[in-house]
Amino acid sequence: MVQTLEVGATHTLDVLVTDANTAEYLAESGETLPPVFATPFMIAAMERACAALLSVALEEGDVSVGAKIDVSHVAPSPVGVEILATARFTDREGPLFWFDVSAEDPGGLIGKGRIARAILSMDKVKARAEVRR
């Protein structure tokens, strides 16, 4: 049953920093990047938290997709620490569902910002992607 997403609703998920989600892991040959939690993985955790919140509003065959991101990564996190990524639903503007997001490690805030997601049919997403081949 589809539910209404309530303003102020939150979802938090945890991610363990491992070698496989560091900036160093993403480096290509000849590049030097630090062995700390990589920004793309932080944003992915934030997006997942948003998607988990929005899942209550999906009808069968629908999926939520990222639409806009404004996020800052403000502190490094070493391998072995747990990251908590939190999304809080703030409002809806037309087709966009807006979330305030943050990420923390044991030392405090590592990232924050806003993310917008939209709801589309999975078939439509697949069809739109297919024409881009």
Image (spheres, rainbow, N blue to C red):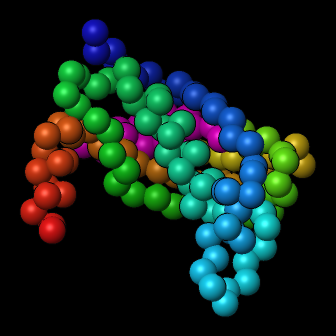
Residue at the image position 33 percent from the left and 46 percent from the top: 65
Give the left or right position of residue 77, taking residue 7 as reference: right
Q: Is residue 85 above or below residue 24?
A: above
**Residue 77 in picture, x, y percent from top left:** 81, 57
Give the left or right position of residue 73, taking residue 44 as reference: right
Q: Is residue 38 above or below residue 125?
A: below
Q: Which residues are magenta?
A: 85-100
Residue at the image position 88 percent from the left and 43 percent from the top: 106
**Residue 26 in picture, x, y percent from top left:** 62, 70
For residue 93, say whether it is visible: no
**Residue 59 in picture, x, y percent from top left:** 22, 22
Give the left or right position of residue 8, taking residue 82 as reference: left
**Residue 70 in picture, x, y percent from top left:** 51, 61
Position of the C terminus, as image quadrant, is bottom left
In the current view of this chain or complex, which residue is farthest to the top?
1
Q: Main secondary structure of the magenta part?
A: strand
